[in-house]
Image (cartoon, rainbow, N blue to C red):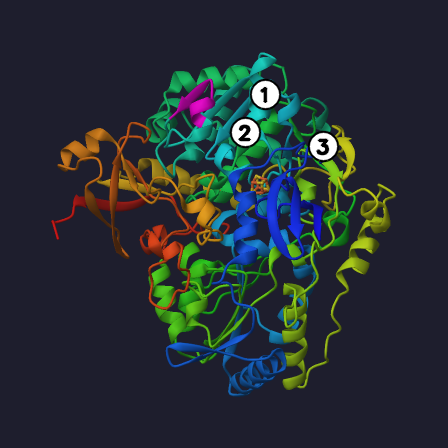
Amino acid sequence: MRRTHVRTCHICEANCGILVEMDGDAVRAIRGNPDDVLSRGHICPKATAIADIEADPDRLRRPVRREGTGWVEADWDEAFCDIAARMAAIRAAGGEAALYIGNPSAHNFALGMQLGLLKKALATRNVFSASTVDQIPHQLVQMWMYGHNALFPIPDIDRTQLMLIVGGNPLASNGSVWTVPDVKRRISALKARGGRLVVVDPRRTETAATADTHHFIRPGTDAAFLLGLLVALDEAGLVNPGRLAPLLDPGWKAAWEAFGRFRIEALASWCAVPAEAIRELARALGAGPPAIVYGRMGVSVSPFGALNHWLIQCLNIATGNLDREGGLLFSVPPADVVMASGPGSYGRYRSRVRGLPEVMGEYPVATLADEIETPGPGQVRALVTVAGNPVLSTPDGSRLARALGGLDLMVAVDMYVTATSAHAHWILPPCGPLAKAHYPLLLGPIAVRNFAKYAPPARPLAEGEKDDWQIVAGLAAAIARARGLERPAPVDPEAALDRWLRAGTSGLTLDDLRAAPHGIDLGPHAGGRLPARLRTADGRIHAAPEACLADLDRLREAIAAPRPPGLLLIGRRHIRTNNSWLSNSRRLVKGPDRCTLMIHPEDAARRGIGHGDTVTVTSRVGRVTVPAEVTQAIMPGVVSLPHGWGHGRPGVRLRVAQERPGVSLNDLTDPAALDPVSGNAVLNGTPVEVERAAPA
Ligand code: SF4
């Protein structure tokens, strides 16, 4: 029977409403939902990939156990029992366990609710996630300044007059750490009302191409640019936090004393954005109309990730734009993560091998291979990955792949045999996306408008299928039982969601959301949420976190140090990709080869490289071979590879992806390079050599 299901696309943070036309369990069409309260009909090409995932013959339908170089199907009880027994034996023999949580878990409210059970059953501090490859600096700075790691200031793009984006490309990402469907229309509206978009990026990205102004910036130097803006604001007498002034603790004064020791010309020379451009932009930001400074992936995956995010907060405060309509706003979502969870943590304990501090209960993922490979008490001998592909997404993936191959037990909760799960002893596949319920528990709170939307499963679980949350809860229970620990009860996701909603201020219940499939619009966010929303002990903004203030000395040293010769590598993403998630979708992979090395014509000419030539790219840790794309869209001295590619590794079973597997950016990025404050991996600015490959 044909039926149209009202759903939310779960693939990226934008949470677009979709209408899924199904004939029984078969998907006939997917289109944007014009009645969706948030996205109003917008979708991007990725939504249609849901049909490919549902029907994909490469998607695993049953647990599989590795036998030699092949896989054997098993039932769930056998899988849970064998894994639990092996895990218990490893732990009893003194081996450590580790857990890696991939980015899709943030898009799945029911799964997220069970992860605590698995952490408890594994009883390990070796927890890693995708957060330390891209976003932990946001959370850390928010915890330090506002008292809770989830207090994300949301860019109010619909009411601003000036938006400065540093290291972000929302036209390709559809917003990142910012749920903002149809950002293209919102940018057009900004321009139509006389506003201005400025993008600062080493690449002329899709977003930069639509901007009123684009400045190239040398990778890894954003802190100098942001600091230059602050110094220029002060120079112009435009520092005016307005109503926030009484909320700022004495750190605010200390911060400005430290900023005043830097000179704009030196900062400009290091970051390669002209001093006059910095001064002009500072004047515009401080001119009075609402303005936004938003920094994303490019500033997080930098040697100064935490410092960058602190400086961004300082800019928004100094211009009076934090907690102001048209500036940056704090949400009060219907299911309130801030009220329902702890504030976060830092440095309570350190990693065994490199002594890196935990952040939000996790270690930097760049040290996962160290923990597996380094012998001694506490060595990781067993690993569970949940919805993650760290071989492609974390630095020096090839080394990590070798390390995974030496584990006594690896379990992957994954739909596919990927570059990571290919190393597992067991793969436990969740059901297809349309058999899952959806509520944007972690992404709704960072949405451009306040809203609530729940979608029940569009189809029942097929025989033998399990939802991710059931797998993780079942695995946790089996491991706990085998280890003689208290057996944890699974969290009923819908009951828990209903409790969270009832505890919020909206007065909504899950039944209300069931009755409103297109969602409930709770309006634009309001300014003036501070100080009520702050979670600091004294109810003030802690304006100068000690570690960030101290990090200015490291910045000063970096500016004074000689610049390394050669090219700097940065990543990029495309609207038709989503990390490594969608590489097996026939609908998405069509079109020109997207895994190319962008290189500026001057750099190409110097090396005798022509457009389309095959080149080798070599870093301290690895080498890849890839076609060159000679383009003015990249800054001289910089080259770019997209991330999420490299499906040609042995054992991978993604037949569509393997037709054009590409190479992995993270075979070049260096796990030794970290932001020492936040532990975030440095994925941008990797020094590389590029040369034309010898003809085969
Ligand atoms: S922008 Fe695309 S991938 Fe993201 S939620 Fe919307 S349709 Fe899905």
Determine which residue is flagged by label 1: 239
Q: Nearer the viewer, residue 253 or 111?
A: 111
* Residue holding disc 2: 256
Ligand 1 within 8 Å of the CB at mark 2: no
CA gap between label 1 and label 3 equals 15 Å
Residue with the mark numbered 3 = 247
Please give the name of the residue rendered at 56% of the width and 72% of the height, measured from the top-left corner: 62
Using the numbered discs, state the Cα–Cα distance from disc 1 to disc 2 in whole angstroms.
Answer: 10 Å
The disc, 1 or 2, on the residue closer to the chain's N-terminal end is 1
Nearer to the camera, 69 or 360: 69
Q: Position of residue 366 (x, y in %)?
A: 43, 58
Circle 3: element type: helix
Residue 120 appears in which quarter of the rendering? bottom right
- Is 231 positioned to the left or the right of 406 in the image? right
Query: Which residue type does callout 1 highlight?
Result: Val
Residue at the image point whose x is 28% and y is 30% from the top: 631
Asked if residue 470 lies in the magenta stretch, the reply is no
Q: Secondary structure at mark 1?
A: loop
Amino acid type, label 3: Leu
Q: Nearer the viewer, mark 2 or mark 3?
A: 3
Q: Residue at x 36, y 40 (%)?
A: 557
Q: Residue furthest right?
A: 507
Which of the four quarters of the rendered structure image does ligand 1 lie in? Answer: top right
Which amino acid type corresponds to the residue marked 2 in the rendered image?
Trp
Where disc 2 sits, the SS reads: helix
Identify the magenta region.
208-215
